[in-house]
Image (cartoon, helix red, strand yellow):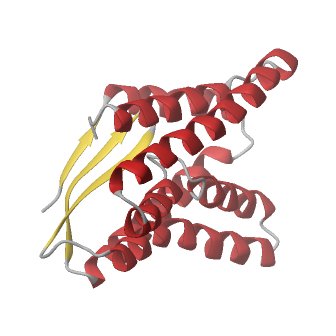
Amino acid sequence: MPRIEVSPGFLLLIGALFWLDEGVGLLPWGVLACGLHELGHIAAAAVWGGHVRKLSLTVVGAELRIDYDAPLAYGPDSMVALAGPGVNLLFGMLMLSLGWELAGVVSLTIGGFNLLPIPPLDGGRVVYGWLAVRLDTDWAERLMTAMSGCLVGVLAGVGIMAAVHYGNATLLLTALWLLAGVLRRESGQT
């Protein structure tokens, strides 16, 4: 049975999102899209003998820890990583085809965002694996850090503009979280 941890930061995040939602309905669709995302990872991992050891719900979202019967090669690992965004993209398209625009856009946004090639996002995992198969791991690490740093810089810049112009710091805070992930990876803490 997997261990489930819920941090106080996660509860604070849900409370803040509920307060900010102002009856629009983003929160329930966002929670559903995130849940489907993680179920996609879990289902794909199970195909390759994966077992969820721990699910952590934190202020930055959900994090799965999965144990495998044997180490995964790049292909299966990429399939597991892409399964979450894939489920989001399929669910989003289904919702749009049914005329449920808000649900569709939320799911497509979550899926598309997770495809960015920045660790700790799913796209970062796939791109790093692709680079590591083709290059020396030191070069793969360097390229990932450089690419991730550039992308996080762009997101932070757009986030600063959004915070100043619209009073919304969501993208800036997301960029800072991603920067922490890149720095943690660079220092070998992941």
Residue depicted at 55% across the width and 26% down the height: 176
- Out of 41 and 133, give the one closest to the viewer: 133
Q: Residue at x 36, y 73 (%)?
A: 74
Q: In the picture shown, does residue 62 fall above or below 83?
A: above
| Image x and y of residue 18, in percent | 59, 33
Taking depth in this image into account, of 15 and 107 the one nearest to the observer is: 107
Q: Quadrant of residue 23?
A: top right
Q: Position of residue 177 (x, y in %)?
A: 50, 30
Please provide percent x and percent y for residue 182.
Answer: 45, 36
Q: Quadrant of the N terminus?
A: bottom left
| Quarter holding residue 152 | top right
Q: Quadrant of residue 92?
A: bottom right
Q: Confirm whether residue 4 shows in the render.
A: yes
| Nearer the observer, 118 or 19 | 118
Say left or right for 86 vs 109. Answer: left
Q: Residue at the right extreme?
A: 165
**Quarter of the image that includes the C terminus:** top left
155 horizontally vs 139: left or right? right
Q: Is residue 45 left or right of residue 172?
A: left
Q: Is residue 43 visible?
A: no
Question: How many discs appear?
Answer: 0
> Residue at (72%, 34%) from the top-left corner?
154
Position of 69 with respect to 14 (left or right) is left
| Image spot of residue 39 (x, y percent) | 40, 68
> Where 60 sits versus 129, above or below?
above
